[in-house]
Image: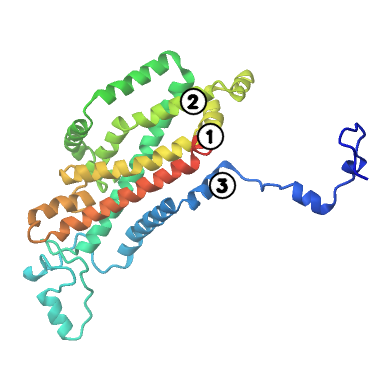
Amino acid sequence: MDKNPLSMQVNVDDFLPASEEEKAYMVQMRPSSTFFKDGCKRLFRNKVAFVSMIVIILITVSSIVIPMFWPYDYQTQLGVQPGHPVDPSFNNLAPMEYSTTEQAAMAKGETVFPHFFGTDDHGRDYFIRIVYGTRISLAVGFFASIIVLVVGMTLGSVAGFMGGRVDMVIMRIVDVIYSLPDMLMVILLASVMRETLGSALEGTVLQAIGSNIISLFIIFALLYWCSMARLIRGQILSLREQEYVLAAEATGAKAGWIIKKHLIPNCISVIIISTALQIPSAIFTESFLSFLGLGVNAPMPSLGSLASEALNGITSYPYRLVIPALVISLIVLGLNLFGDGLRDAFDPKLNQ
C-alpha cells in the first residue's frame, strides 16, 4: 500500500538488504593510484605534450644511434688522405652531391654513401656534424639543468627551512645575481674561464670535454640556480608549518632528514616542471655562446657553432645556416611544449 506522505511511520522496505546488482551500482570503487601515475595519465592525454615528448625522444635516440653505423666522422676531412694530395672536390658539396673521386669510384661499380646535407668547406660530412651538434647541445642542456637543479634545490630548501639569517643571506645573494646583466656576465665569465681552465685541464680526464664546456657548466652553477631556489624556497615555507613536519621535529629528527624525507618529496611537482623548462634555456644559452665562439672547442661541433660557421658562406650555401637553426628551433619548441604539458599534468593547483 502507498504510504501517507504526512505519516511518521517508518517504511520497512527501505531497510531491506541490497542485492549484489544494487551494491555494484551504488559502490563505484576507484582503482588505487599515486600522484605520479595520475600526472602521467594527464600528460599522455595532452596530445601536444605527448607528440613533443615523442619528437624529443626520437631526436635524442637518433643523435646517439646514428653515429654508430654512419660511415663518416664529424672531424674527418674526406679530401685529405696521408700520402696523397688534397682533393678539393670534396669541399662545399651540395646535398646529395658527389665529389669527382666518388663519381669515378661509382663509375667503377663501387658503392659510395651519399652526403645527405653535403659537405662543409673542409670536406667534412655535414649531416653527421649536425647529428653530433645535436648530441652536444642536448647533453649540455641536460647536464646543465641537473647542475641547476642540485644547486637551486639545496640552497632553496635550506633557506626555506632554516629561515632567519640563513634565509636572508641566501636571498640577498639571489638579489645580487638578479641585478647583474645576464648575458654580459655569461660572456665575461665564459671568456675568463676559457683562458684560466685551458692550462688547468691539460693531462686530466676533463681535457677531452674541453675548457669551454666546463666553463659553461660553472656559469650555470653560478648564475642560473636563482629561479629554482626561489621556487623551492616558497614551497618549503608553506610546507614547513604542516603537522607532519612538527611531528618529525618533536621526535628529534634532524633538519636534513626532514628536508630529504618530507619536504623535497612534496615539492616534486615544482622540481619536475622547473627542470623540464630549464633544459631549453640551457640549450639556447649554449647555442648562443657557441655562435659567439665561446662554446665547444673545435673541431667538435654544436648547433650554435655550426650556425656561426655557416655565416661565412650564407649567400652561397644558405642551407648550412637553415638546417642547424631549424634543429635548434625544433628542440627548444618541443622541450617548451613538453614542459608546459608537465606543468599542466603535475601542478596540483591546475587540477582542482
For the point 19% across and 72% down, the residue is: 96
Query: Which of the labelled discs sits on residue 265, or is there none?
Result: 1
For the point 90% across and 33% down, the residue is: 7
Q: Nearer the viewer, residue 298 or 343?
A: 343
- Amino acid marked by disc 1: Pro
- Amino acid marked by disc 3: Lys
- Give the residue number, with chain letter if any, for mark 2: 236
Please identify the quadrant where the C terminus is shown. Answer: top right
Where is residue 237 shown, x and y percent of the image? 48, 22
Q: Is residue 347 above or below residue 30?
A: above
Q: Counting other residues with Cα less than 10 Å from the Cα at mark 1, is it few (<14), some (14-19), or many (20 or more)?
A: few
* Color scheme of the displayed model: rainbow
Q: Is residue 297 above or below residue 92?
A: above
Q: Earlier in the sequence, mark 1 or mark 3?
A: 3
Give the CA separation, mark 3 to mark 2.
Answer: 24 Å
Q: Is residue 55 left or right of residue 299?
A: right
- Give the residue number, with chain letter if any, for mark 3: 37
Q: Earlier in the sequence, mark 3 or mark 2?
A: 3
Please report contact status of discs 1 and 3: CB closer than 8 Å, yes or no. Answer: no
